[in-house]
């Protein structure tokens, strides 16, 4: 985004004057703006109206008394481009273009959108084909539909690639504080990354919620996510839809298994972007981080008012990965002295009915458990509805105790209702005033806390310089000159990069004799052909060969199998390798180059069942030991490496070191790597060995 566009986006977000251009939709939007109490100038533009929502109306934009900071444009598409050009000529700041009929239609619409972009120049243009823009701070609403009009001093900004989701979000009954809501539309001029650049610097913005189906510029988005970490403003992302984001190759298992959604998740995880899986989870997470703040980790102290709530909370936490550490020995002793005899000392801690509403005793109990050191604390409590003959003030005493103890401990606090509807508006507002997040629904709340902890953990890593792997670095590579190396060539390159491979040699089938081998039996033998991507499927591999006679038979069998599989892949060359013994587990380490995300790594259960097992984790390169270790721990094969059911343990450290070295190889290889499968990597009790390798390179691109 150009500097002038950036300045104009600031004008658009916080305008001094707004022009509403068009007919009924424009007048409706002007009325919303007036109803919200916008203090700036409001003008209408319409050739057929004397006034617009009670405000002065001008025939053309050239008649306006000043250059408007913001415009809501709702004219037919045949007039839109000309009107945008006129607005540009008079120095307009920006436009929320409600008008549709552009790139979303394809064909002529695409051409119209190109003309629109040219006409906009350096103006900040939202859309076209969008709901518009809401400013909850000043009431500068450029919006096409009705919504509950509220105002906030600070809050989360929402940027959505779905207009209807934007509209639905504005009607939520969850007391989420908003600063801005932006319906991005076609993103002809401004993309998600552009909005982030300006919103993150706005003092009224506490966090940014995104609904995205795709990102235009992954590298720039990464820069904005890093900016969010540095400013302490979480980004909460709901990823919708699926798209082909430019994967160039699918020859390897890695290419087949690494879809766009996994790449986005890897990107978000790397950058501390809080990924959620539903609109409700997005709103609860935004509420948490905006009101109470993001927890620095996953250790949570939980309090309930019933055993059932405690059990439900514990079950959901265990499933999602939120940690509820039990009280330490000294803390447990103190709690037994403070709690009624019917209470069980645990985490979650059921306060039991004798303590309900006893502010002094509840504060003491909560403070005692929090002294063990936690990242956040929650109280599960449902509130009576306003039409019930019960005072909420009695219920709030326990929440007030949580508030005091959490404030003293310096950690985020939340009150969680077991059912989403069981916190009334008045109570939600009261909790927010006390910097406690009113979270609605146990599962959504636990997900919100667990997801938000990612931002806290990544912020800590960045602040403490734990690693320097943050940005992505896409390169200009293509498959135009892609070259597949045979297994021997691939392994030679890996060996030069410090990656262990089996002892082996190339043998020729037509000149083979008993003295040809320099390695000891038993051996494995494989056909060498750059045209054969997956040797096992073609019968091009033979294992556990113990003598020359078996070797001769194996080669003849491979020749026959391969000829049946494909007529043009057989060669006279074979790779003979020493058999790898005492294998604990098999792992796949794969690399793929993606034109948007750059280099990516796949860690997965290896061997012939790799795709069926669906046991994989995706990382972006460059990566580091901690990230690889974390990804590996999430794989099912990790249990085998640890020594499943009394079997020997594998060398986890060597596997992690190898994966990091494979990543470095991909980034630094003299010939640019397009795709690499090392499958399987044999994990031994001591060390690991790359048993097979498929490597494709871009022969036209070399590192300096």
Image (spheres, rainbow, N blue to C red):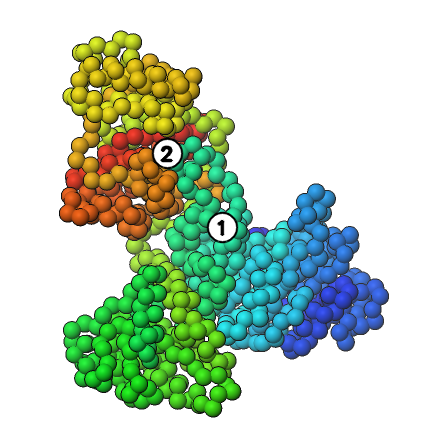
Q: CA distance from mark 1 to mark 2?
A: 27 Å
Which of the pair 309/653 is nearer the observer? Answer: 309
Q: Camera-side residue: 40 or 539? A: 539
The x, y position of residue 663, in whole percent, is 33, 40
Q: In the image, what residue occupies the spot 31% across and 80% down? A: 405
What residue lies at 80% left-to-right and 67% top-to-bottom? 58
Disc number for residue 220: 1
Q: Is any part of residue 578 visible from this angle? A: yes
Q: State the image coordinates of residue 362 (x, y, percent, origin top left).
A: 29, 84
Q: Residues within 10 Å of mark 2 (few under 14, many from 20)?
A: many
Residue 342 is left or right of residue 562, and the answer is left
Residue topped by disc 2:
676
Residue at 36% in and 76% down: 380
How far from the left and from the top, in percent, is residue 626?
28, 51
Helix, strand or loop status at disc 1: helix
In the rendering, which numbered label is found on residue 244? none
Residue depicted at x 16% and y 73%: 329
């Amino acid at each position: 985004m150009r500097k002038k566009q950036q300045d104009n986006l600031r004008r658009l977000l916080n305008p001094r004057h707004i022009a509403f251009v068009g007919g009924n939709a424009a007048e409706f939007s002007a009325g919303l703006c007036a109803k919200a109490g916008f203090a700036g100038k409001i003008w209408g533009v319409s050739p057929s109206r004397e006034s617009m929502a009670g405000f002065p109306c001008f025939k053309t934009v050239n008649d306006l008394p000043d250059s408007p900071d913001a415009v809501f444009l709702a004219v037919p598409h045949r007039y839109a481009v000309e009107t945008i050009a006129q607005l540009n000529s008079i120095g307009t700041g920006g436009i929320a273009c409600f008008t549709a009929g552009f790139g979303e239609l394809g064909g002529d619409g695409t051409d119209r959108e190109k003309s629109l972009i040219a006409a906009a120049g350096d103006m900040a243009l939202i859309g076209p084909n969008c709901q518009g823009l809401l400013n909850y701070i000043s009431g500068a609403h450029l919006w096409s539909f009705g919504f509950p009009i509220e105002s906030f001093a600070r809050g989360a900004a929402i940027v959505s690639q779905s207009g209807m989701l934007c509209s639905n979000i504005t009607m939520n009954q969850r007391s989420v504080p908003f600063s801005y809501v932006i319906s991005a539309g076609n993103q002809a001029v401004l993309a998600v990354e552009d909005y982030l650049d300006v919103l993150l610097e706005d003092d009224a913005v506490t966090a940014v919620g995104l609904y995205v189906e795709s990102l235009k510029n992954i590298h720039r988005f990464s820069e904005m996510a890093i900016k969010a970490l540095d400013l302490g403003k979480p980004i909460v992302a709901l990823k919708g839809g699926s798209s082909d984001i430019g994967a160039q190759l699918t020859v390897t298992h890695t290419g087949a298994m690494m879809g766009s959604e996994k790449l986005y998740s890897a990107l978000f995880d790397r950058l501390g972007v809080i990924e959620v899986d539903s609109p409700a989870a997005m709103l609860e997470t935004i509420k948490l981080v905006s009101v109470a703040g993001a927890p620095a980790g996953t250790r949570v102290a939980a309090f309930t008012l019933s055993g059932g709530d405690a059990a439900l909370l514990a079950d959901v936490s265990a499933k999602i990965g939120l940690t509820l550490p039990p009280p330490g020995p000294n803390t447990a002793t103190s709690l037994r002295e403070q709690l009624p005899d019917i209470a069980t000392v645990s985490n979650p801690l059921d306060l039991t009915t004798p303590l309900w509403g006893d502010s002094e005793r509840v504060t003491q109990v909560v403070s005692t458990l929090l002294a063990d050191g936690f990242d956040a604390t929650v109280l599960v409590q449902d509130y009576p509805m306003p039409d019930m003959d019960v005072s909420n003030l009695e219920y709030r005493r326990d929440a007030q105790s949580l508030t005091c103890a959490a404030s003293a401990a310096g950690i985020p606090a939340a009150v969680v209702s077991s059912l989403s509807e069981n916190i009334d508006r008045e109570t939600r507002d009261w909790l927010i005033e006390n910097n406690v997040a009113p979270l609605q629904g146990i599962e959504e709340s636990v997900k919100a806390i667990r997801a938000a902890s990612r931002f806290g953990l990544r912020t800590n890593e960045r602040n403490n310089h734990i690693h320097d792997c943050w940005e992505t670095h896409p390169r200009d590579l293509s498959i135009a000159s892609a070259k597949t190396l045979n297994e021997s060539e691939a392994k030679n390159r890996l060996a030069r990069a410090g990656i262990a491979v089996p002892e082996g040699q190339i043998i020729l089938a037509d000149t083979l004799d008993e003295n040809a081998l320099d390695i000891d039996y038993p051996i494995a033998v494989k056909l060498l052909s750059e045209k054969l991507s997956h040797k096992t499927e073609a019968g091009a591999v033979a294992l556990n060969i113990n003598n020359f006679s078996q070797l001769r038979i194996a080669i003849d069998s491979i020749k026959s199998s391969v000829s049946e599989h494909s007529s043009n892949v057989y060669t006279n060359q074979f790779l003979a390798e020493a058999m790898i013994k005492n294998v604990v587990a098999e792992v796949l380490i794969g690399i793929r180059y993606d034109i948007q995300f750059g280099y990516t790594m796949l860690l997965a259960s290896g061997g012939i069942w790799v795709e069926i097992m669906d046991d994989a984790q995706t990382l972006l390169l460059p990566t580091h030991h901690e990230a690889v270790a974390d990804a590996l721990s999430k794989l099912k094969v990790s249990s085998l490496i640890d020594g499943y059911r009394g079997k020997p343990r594998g060398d986890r450290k060597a596997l992690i070191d190898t994966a990091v070295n494979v990543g470095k190889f991909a980034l630094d290889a003299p010939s640019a790597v397009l795709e690499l499968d090392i499958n399987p990597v044999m994990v031994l009790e001591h060390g690991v060995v790359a048993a097979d390798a498929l490597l494709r390179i871009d022969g036209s691109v070399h590192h300096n």
